Amino acid sequence: MSRRGPIIAGAACVVLAVLGVVLLVLPKMNEVTAKEDQLAAAEDQEGTLQAELGRLEDARAEAPEAEAEIRELETLVPPTEDLPGMIRLLSGAADRAGVEFFSVAPGAPAGDESGEFSIITTGVTVNGEFFSLDEFAYRLETLPRAAKVMNISISRGGGEEGSDTGGLSMQLTLELYTTDPSAGPGSDPAPGESYFASAPTTGA
């Protein structure tokens, strides 16, 4: 027997082994690697989803508090002019303060320089005794709707022409606000309308 026989047989076995590795083992190894990559990606995605779920659960838990804050802000600075509501607030403050005479003259809304809200400059006159005027000024500071006193002056006497209210007369210039930057559609009243209200009050 030739000595080449075992060598050829051995070489053939090596070739077959290499072919087995190439044809069978390597594809399986590549498949395993791909599966490992998919598993790592899935684990990363799961971590991301868990974090997102945590944020959503936190947001849901905080939602009632956030909604309450939004409602409070919308009361302080409503989304429309709501001049009738504003006049009712000021008139109610005058009644509870016990002033003898109350009038209010809202001006036309004017956009703020930021363009984010509108300012309603409003003139208010109240007549009465010192303590009732002082009480009215205090109630302005505690209105449900945000109001800023820009000017205030007090004089003796006052009231409508021909009336005899006596006491003191206080004139105020207020600023009230709405988040409607143009006081446009949806405002109450519509753009261009204005209100003037004056009446003697009965006191609290």
Image (spheres, helix red, strand yellow):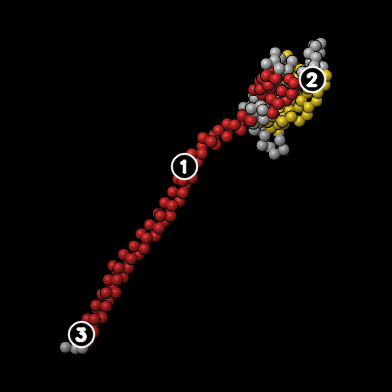
Which residue in the protein does label 1 denote? 57
Q: Please, which residue is most extreme toward the right here?
A: 156
Q: In this view, does 4 lie to the left or right of 159?
A: left
Amino acid type indicated by mark 1? Glu
Which residue in the protein does label 2 denote? 169
The residue nearer to you, when weighing 175 against 27, is 175
The residue nearer to you, when weighing 58 against 24, is 58
Q: What percent of the width, then of the height, locates residue 136?
A: 72, 23
Q: Is mark 2 on a helix, strand or loop?
A: strand
Residue at x-position 44% and y-position 48%: 50
Q: How far apart are marks 2 and 3 (CA)?
A: 128 Å
The numbered mark, 2 or 3, whose residue comes first in the sequence reads 3
Residue 5's label in the rendered image is 3
Residue at x-position 80% and y-position 11%: 164
Residue 179 found in image quarter: top right
Q: What element carries label 1?
A: helix
Residue 142 found in image quarter: top right
Amino acid type indicated by mark 2? Ser
Which class describes the residues within 10 Å of circle 1: few (<14), some (14-19), or many (20+)?
few
The numbered mark, 1 or 2, whose residue comes first in the sequence reads 1
Q: Distance between the residues labelled 1 and 3?
A: 75 Å
Q: How far apart are marks 1 and 2 (CA)?
A: 56 Å
Residue mark closest to the camera, 2 vs 3: 2
The residue nearer to you, when weighing 76 against 132, is 132
Residue 189 found in image quarter: top right
Q: What percent of the width, then of the height, locates residue 47?
A: 43, 52
